[in-house]
Amino acid sequence: MQAVEEVVEQCPHCGEPISLLLDLSGGSQAYTEDCQVCCQPIHVSIWIDAGEDDYHLDLRREQD
């Protein structure tokens, strides 16, 4: 697994595709990032599964 990975996901507010750079070297994490299209805050959660060399990504609206 690379330390930094670019993914394209849909914004949970406007549904438009957005590009995220994930820093996978920091382990599991949660942070807020604004949508590049509608500027609404998105709660980003990353869970690192070290045993399978994989991660899981969850994007939610802040109020969810």
Image: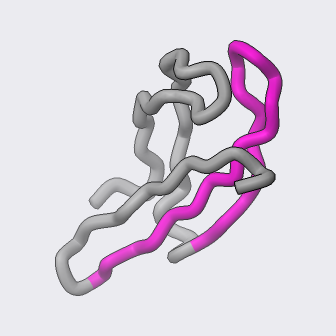
Give the quarter of the figure containing the N terminus.
bottom left
Q: Picture coordinates of residue 7 (x, y %)?
A: 41, 35
Tell me which residue sits at (80%, 30%) in the image: 40
Residue drawn at point x = 54 percent, y = 21 percent: 15
Color scheme of the displayed model: one colour
Q: Give 19 or 62, whichever is nearer the viewer.
A: 62
Q: Which of the 4 image quarters holds residue 20?
A: top right
Whole-percent x and y of residue 61?
70, 45
Q: Residue furthest bottom?
A: 51
Residue at far left of view:
52
- Magenta segment: 29-50
The picture places residue 12, in percent across and down from the top left corner, at 59, 35
Name the residue rendered at 26%, 66% in the picture: 54
The answer to whether residue 53 is above or below residue 31 is: below
Left or right relative to 45: residue 47: left
Is residue 49 one of those drawn in magenta?
yes
